[in-house]
Amino acid sequence: MTNIAQLLTDNGIRKAAIIDDAFDEAPRAYDLDVESWNTFWDDITVYEDAIRTIYPGYSSAEREDLQDSNEFISLLWEHRESLPTGVRSTLFENYEQKSPVERKWLNGLVDSLKSLGLECTTLGREFADKVGDADLIIIDLFLGFLESERDMQKAIEGVGKLILGRESSPPLVILMSRSPRLAEKRNEFRDRAGLLGSTFRVSSKVNLATDGKLEAILVRLATHYQDAKRVAGFVHAWDNGLDQARKSFIQVLRRLDLQDLAQIRALLLDFEGQDLGEYLLDVADRVLQHEIEDDDTTIAAALELNTIDLSKYPAPHLSGSPDLQDLVHRMLFLHSDRLLLSIDDGKVQLRFGDVLRWKVGDGTVFSDDVSIVVTPACDLVRNGAKRVMLLSGVLEGLEPKNWSYRTDPVRTAIVVLPEEGRKWIKWNLKDVKALSWNELDTVLANEDKAKRIGRLREMYAVELQQKLLAYVGRIGQPANLPVPFLVDVAFFYVDTDSKVKKLNIEPIDSAACYVGKDAQSKPVHRLVLTEQACDLIEQALQALHDDKVNTAARASLTAVKGDSGFFTAFEHGEIEISTEEGTKTIRGKDNNVYASIVRGGDLAEGIKVSGDQKKAALIVKVMDIAEEDTG
């Protein structure tokens, strides 16, 4: 406890606020359902004089208005002891039963926080103006008895207001609930409230009541709080810098008169063969980027990011998502709406970097065959080139094994297609075709044989062009980000009969396989589990008795139980797995086999194993998830 308390203090976490509707002094109108009200009105007739004494405006008020009146409900609640038992129980029985039980549990949570040296404030639904400068906020997902969307919206809006003015140094937020919808709603809550993943945690109230769970969450949040604030500062600086850059650029743009545009048209665009709208949008892209780079605060915040020691990053709280894949796609391709600027009276005007997708021979459906326009932009002017050079490629399904940093085969790492999702393009430098303008017009007319599906940004199109022309002199470009692919994981141990048996572990969220490269640019795949999953693995192994496991694995199990570094490796996502179907062995102290990581294959409960797998304290089966299964 002392160490945790000191950790919290050292990182400036001194005040906590617990927000839950159970702390309200009285129920609200929307805590009571329509059925209860209907019964109430049926039962109240003979007791109306008592109600008038409590609420003088009763006689002149409409029932619908009374049902929506927090004042009326508060007075009924305040005088509930004087109401007939049947009338009282009709409205308040469920609320009276739940509220004291929930408040007792919450008071225990308050005591736990105070034992860690934190000042603790308890608040109900009207909390936005009372939280003050709390460094830690623990809030219920649904701020209402009926757990409706309105109740969640109340929590989201309140937290969003708390963040205003604290964007560069946001409070830590723990989202809790007893609802089974917590897992479903956590991402929505985080995004709509404007929270950073590194300052946000989610836990059911049941888990939060488990010994050590609250402390484990606080340790993880506090340990990386300073780095999380650096990330928050960068995001906030970028947000403000983007707004300032936009204003600065608009001032410049407003100074352009029609005469200026006419001269641009006459002295440049007539020769270049480019439309004014598309040209000015290209200019806007580059100038806006220049203005952002001129913002000192943004640059300073970016420099702060360099001080983060990423070798000590924590395990993800939520499973890996395709967000980074989408980010790479946006780096590589112009937005599809930009293509509208190069359509003239329904006719596609091809530009450098345009990607075409071809139909099958009978023209019924689109194939996976694609081409990219690599004729120099200046030669495309006014159909200046007699033929347009097209580099051929093929669309491939995007799987972890395909995400590579190697230069061979030549690739475009990702392309997102409507209705089909994420794919990558494998380019064939030996397959080049050149079509005349008439042939292209025929091909693209009404998309009879092909259609344009996107346009690579210039630097990436130039790289392909250079590889095609020389196979050397690659244009430098930002490396593609390591990205996660969702995978399913299952955990086993080897029983006394040398058979694989499932480990007694609660179900966990889908894990992620992060794909990147090592110092030699070789592909590396790493299994990354959420911190909850890491805790569950440790708990299950600690509870596993030696007499349940194979004699060959007992030394490994004993070693694992005493080696916290093993669980740290899982928590930090340092577990390498095979890039394709296969097995990796993790050894630890005294060369014991700590784990066997099996990717794919037919490993299942009841199968006999031998060799290193028989000696393993833990067997982890990793299965790739097809994109159509992830939604």
Image (cartoon, grey):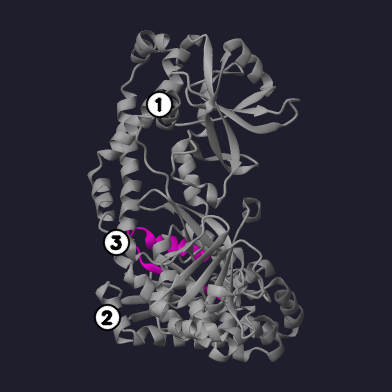
Q: Tell me the amino acid under the disc marked 1.
A: Asp
Q: Which of labels 3 and 1 is toward the front?
A: 3
Distance between the alpha carbons at the discs numbered 1 and 2:
53 Å
Q: Nearer the viewer, residue 302 or 541?
A: 541
Residue at image point 34% right, 42% down? 242
Query: As drawn, is 7 to the left or to the right of 347?
Result: left
Residue 273 place in picture, x, y as percent: 45, 12
SS under mark 3: loop
Residue annotated with mark 2 = 6
Q: Residues within 10 Å of mark 2 (few under 14, many from 20)?
A: some
Residue in front for this viewpoint, 222 or 284: 222
Q: Which mark is residue 309?
A: 3
Q: Which image quadrant is residue 272 in?
A: top left
Q: Secondary structure at mark 1?
A: helix
Query: Residue drawn 39% across and 63% down?
Result: 198
One can see residue 134 in this view: no
Amino acid at the residue labelled 3: Asp
